[in-house]
Image (cartoon, grey):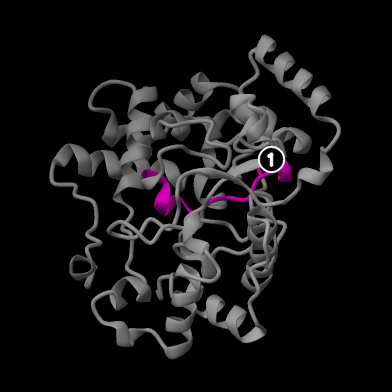
Amino acid sequence: MSGLTGCGLSPPSSDTNGDATSIALGRELFFDQSLSADGTISCANCHVPSKSFTDGQGVSIGVRGVPGTRNAPDLSDATAYSTLFWDGRESELKVVALQAFTNPREMGLPDEAALLKQINTQERYARFAKGRPLDQSDIAGGLTQYLRSLPRQPTRYDRSIGEPSLLSMDERAGLALFAGKAACTECHLLAGDPVALTDQRFHHAGVGFEQIAGDVTALLGRLEQSTRTGQPLGELVLSEREIAELGRFAVTRRPPDLGAFRTPSLRNVARTAPYMHDGSVATLDKAVEREIYYRSLGRGRAVNLTVTEQAQLTAFLRALSTEN
């Protein structure tokens, strides 16, 4: 991975045999379609390495061709977030690692026992078993280690921090707009090494909430019913679009969180269309237009960018993507 160290983006260490073995197990699990109810879906179906670990779909498609409600996020940044999922409903990657296998809108197995049976009856996993059946901790640990091992490739912007000439004039103008007039850094931070490009907070982007306006009381009742019956929130969110549009509120039940979603990182943004939590914005140009409009509403005054300035801002955003 040449060039990583020079940009402060070194690949995660796996300097013990235990880590290397766990990473290998996680990689095997990540690409194994046999661990789904119909044998057609693996983690890699929704998180495709060549698409920056997204899938290019508006919302991801699970077993038997059934769609969910959420746009697949880039997993290469998963270890950098303090909360996970668009609504931040989980904070432990090891917990999240097991959930897709049993979610009816993802891989659809009936329970974790079925997952372990499928794994432990396959010869391909025998080399990881060490004389005993693999358990939930092994599976969650392997997938977590694999995700942690994914290198965060430097973008042209990362490399330009030490060599400004790597950005074109339009891209440098776009950076000035990003940090200034367009106020993008209010949510997409340029702090950190590598730069975070997210404030890890939850904001209203005006996407999808009109579908549930005026019906929140009924949806709150549906949430309470789900809690009483023990239905996992992740299953409810991916199965019912109106619940999905509640955003962070479905987790906290706080009115200010209605329709709020976590700020995504902009790393690889040019490679991860479509955009927003529901994949409803098809192109980067349209995403910029929408963000400018709703940022103006949120601030109570217009963010006025000319056509040229919008093009410069988009040019800079493209420089936030890796080039391989």
Q: Secondary structure at mark 1?
A: loop
Q: Please name the amino acid that badge 1 sits on.
A: Gly
Which image quarter: residue 190? bottom left
The image shows residue 114, relative to residue 259, as above or below, that is above
Which image quarter: residue 16? top left
In the image: residue 129, left or right of residue 211: left
Q: Residue at x 32, y 46 (%)?
A: 148
Residue 45, position in %: x, y?
A: 56, 51
The image shows residue 141, relative to residue 211, as above or below, that is above
The answer to whether residue 146 of the structure is visible from this angle is: yes
Q: Residue at x 63, y 50 (%)?
A: 71
Q: Is residue 282 magenta?
A: no
Q: Which residues are magenta?
A: 62-79
Q: Which residue is mark 1?
A: 259
Residue 126, position in %: x, y?
A: 31, 33
Quadrant occupied by the C terminus: bottom left
The answer to whether residue 27 of the structure is visible from this angle is: no
Q: Residue at x 65, y 82 (%)?
A: 306
Depth check, front residue: 261 or 89? 261
